[in-house]
Image (cartoon, rainbow, N blue to C red):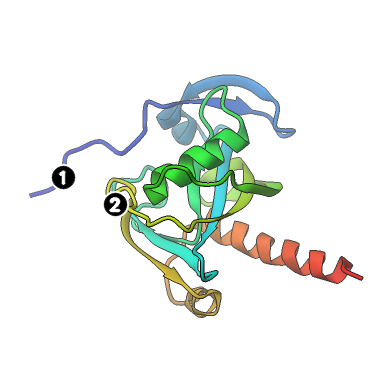
Amino acid sequence: MSDQRPPLGADEVLDIVDEHDRVVGQAPRGAVYAEGLLHRCVFVQARDARGRLFVHRRTDRKLVFPSRYDMFVGGVVGAGESYDEAALREAEEELGVSGLPAPTPLFRFLYRGAGGGWWSAVYEVRCELPVSPQEEEVAWWDFLPEERVEALLDEWEWVPDGLEAYVRLREHRDSAEDKKP
């Protein structure tokens, strides 16, 4: 029997932004995706106490990139919500925790690719709490050593925006290392 439930979050209202990340309007998420309107997203790289990355496979009901793997938790920024508020909300929701420390903002970039375009704020957080990921959002999950994630980059089907954020984060960290005395 097929699942007749609608995709998750289609009615959630988002801010529409321009090429400079300025709010120019609002629309329901389903319309934003259907019309390819620029909006805002957050990507939070969560590590456990041992430094391993939280990796998961999205459910098949996700509006964008269903059933693909991701090395970030996160999602869209709601209308009137700040990037920082969305990063904490999304991380707590997807990891199934409360009391998470505020994720640390790292950088922003304009993603343009498969699925459309959106301003992307990248964060990191250490999660030492026991996680219980949302079953509606996460079909499978584990904490993996970064070396294992690197080995899987060419094997698994990753969400393209998360993969781009991951590559940019690696470059960001390499650049920071180069600047150390």
Q: Nearer the viewer, residue 41 or 47?
A: 47
Q: Nearer the viewer, residue 89 or 100?
A: 100
Q: Is residue 141 above or below residue 20?
A: below
The residue beneath circle 2 is 60
* Marks 1 and 2, the one that precedes in the sequence: 1
Which residue is depicted at the point 49% across and 79% down?
148
Which residue is depicted at the point 87% across and 68% down?
180
Residue furthest left as drawn: 1
Mark 1 and mark 2 residues within 8 Å of each other at the beta carbon: yes
Mark on residue 20? none
Q: Amino acid at mark 1?
A: Asp
The residue beneath circle 1 is 3
> In the shown orientation, is residue 78 left or right of residue 170?
left
- Residue 39 seen in render: no
Whole-percent x, y for residue 16 in the image = 58, 26
Mark 2: few/some/many CA within 10 Å (<14, 14-19, 20+): some
Label 2 element class: loop
Q: CA distance from mark 1 to mark 2?
A: 10 Å
Whole-percent x, y for residue 152 in the image = 47, 76
> In the shown orientation, is residue 61 left or right of residue 30?
left
- Residue 165 seen in render: yes
The count of marks equals 2
> In the shown orientation, is residue 2 left or right of residue 128?
left
Which residue is depicted at the point 53% across and 41% down?
88
Q: Amino acid at mark 2?
A: Asp
Q: Quadrant of the C terminus?
A: bottom right
Mark 1: few/some/many CA within 10 Å (<14, 14-19, 20+): few
Label 1 element class: loop
Locate residue 167: give its quadrant.
bottom right
Whole-percent x, y for residue 78 in the image = 51, 29
